[in-house]
Amino acid sequence: MPTPTKLNVHEAFDLIEAPWAPAIAAQVGGSMVKLVRLEGSFVWHHHEAEDELFYVLSGRLRMQFREQEVVLEAGELICVPAGVEHCPVGEDDCRVMLVEPASTVNTGSVESARTVRELVDLR
């Protein structure tokens, strides 16, 4: 049985080299806890079968939906249900913790230059 270890989330962000490149911080059951720096606008996309939870640790996240926009500050979170098209926009050194199924690809339904399939493992 593996021994539990701790991870300093703030120090872990120093290991993330580029924005929009999620890194694995932990695994909980079939879900991954990922850390990601958001800078500017991402791509419009959706996830067919996966919900995504975005928890803002610092900065500001503007979550764009086709019919509205939700602004999140540090300490706030939003869950984007499967199938809902969205476009995250990071401002002010936005640092986010994601909780999503391990199968989730960051660009969901869209293949783009920002698609990341090989994640850095911070554990």
Image (cartoon, rainbow, N blue to C red):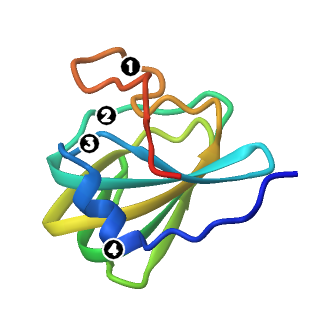
Question: Which residue is label 2 attached to?
Answer: 44
Which of label 3 and label 1 is nearer to you?
A: 3
Q: Between marks 2 and 1, how big is the CA–CA gap?
A: 8 Å
Q: Residue flagged by tag 1: what amino acid is it?
A: Val
Q: CA–CA distance between discs 4 and 3?
A: 17 Å
Tell me which numbered mark, 2 or 4, is placed earlier along the sequence.
Answer: 4
The percent coordinates of residue 28 (x first, y second) are: 74, 55
**10 Å crowding of disc 4: few (<14), some (14-19), many (20+):** few
Question: In this picture, is 120 found above or below 53?
Answer: above
Q: Secondary structure at mark 4?
A: helix
**Residue mark closest to the camera, 4 vs 1:** 4
Query: Element under label 1?
Result: loop
Circles 2, 1 touching at the beta carbon (< 8 Å): yes
Q: Residue at x 14, y 65 (%)?
A: 91
* Label 4 sits on residue: 10
Q: Nearer the viewer, residue 52 or 63?
A: 52
Mark 4 vs mark 1, CA separation in Å: 30 Å
